[in-house]
Amino acid sequence: MTSMAAGGLQMEEGLWRTFTSLLDGPSTARAVATRLGRPVATIVRNLNHLQEHGLVCETGTDRVGHHIERVYRLPEGAVRVRDERALGLAFHETERGLTLAAYNGLPSAAGMVSVCVPRERAAGIMDRLQALREEIENLQQEGGDVKLSFFLAGWTED
């Protein structure tokens, strides 16, 4: 079982899936359960657990048939996530944002992720990023209709 730490919480797969299901926007527990193919009671427990750790917020209620259901969303601002899945998720969300921006006729979309790497691996990673930058610059010579911008910063947290 893979787990992650976010907001001091170790997240097993079910919590992770519940958490990431809210990336598409606010939702009721029933809607999350339907998307994930999980029982509503399980999703409600997951959402309550995530809410206790500040990783999910209630944003109001929604009438569904004869029921009033709570609507949940991700909190505003940054959430610190330590998990091997987080970087892939950030890239996926940036790609999804580009697709949605193009579909809606918007000029851009952006995503940002910060990762901490071992000091002894940082130089090698920077070398690989430099090679990627050079590859992208060579592609730029061919022209195109999608502009990618990069922001890179490095620091130590000693």
Image (tube, rainbow, N blue to C red):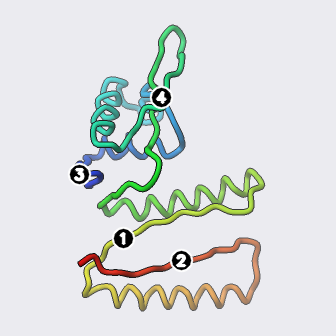
Residue 71 badge: 4
Marks 2 and 1 sit apart, C-alpha to C-alpha, by 13 Å
Q: x%, y% of residue 131?
A: 50, 90
Q: Amino acid at mark 4?
A: Val
Sequence-wise first label, 2 or 3: 3
Q: Which residue is mark 3?
A: 8
Helix, strand or loop for disc 1:
loop
Judged by depth in the image, the label closer to the viewer, 3 or 1, is 3
Sequence-wise first label, 4 or 1: 4
Sequence-wise first label, 2 or 1: 1
The answer to whether residue 125 is above or below residue 105 is: below
Q: Which residue is mark 1?
A: 115
Residue 151 badge: 2
- What residue appears at the point 25 percent right and 80 percent down from the top-left corner? 118
In the image: residue 91, left or right of residue 54: right
Look at the numbered discs 4 and 3 and tell me whether their residues touch, using CB distance below 8 Å. Answer: no
Residue 35 badge: none
Marks 2 and 3 sit apart, C-alpha to C-alpha, by 28 Å
* Circle 4 residues within 10 Å: few <14, some 14–19, many ≥20: some
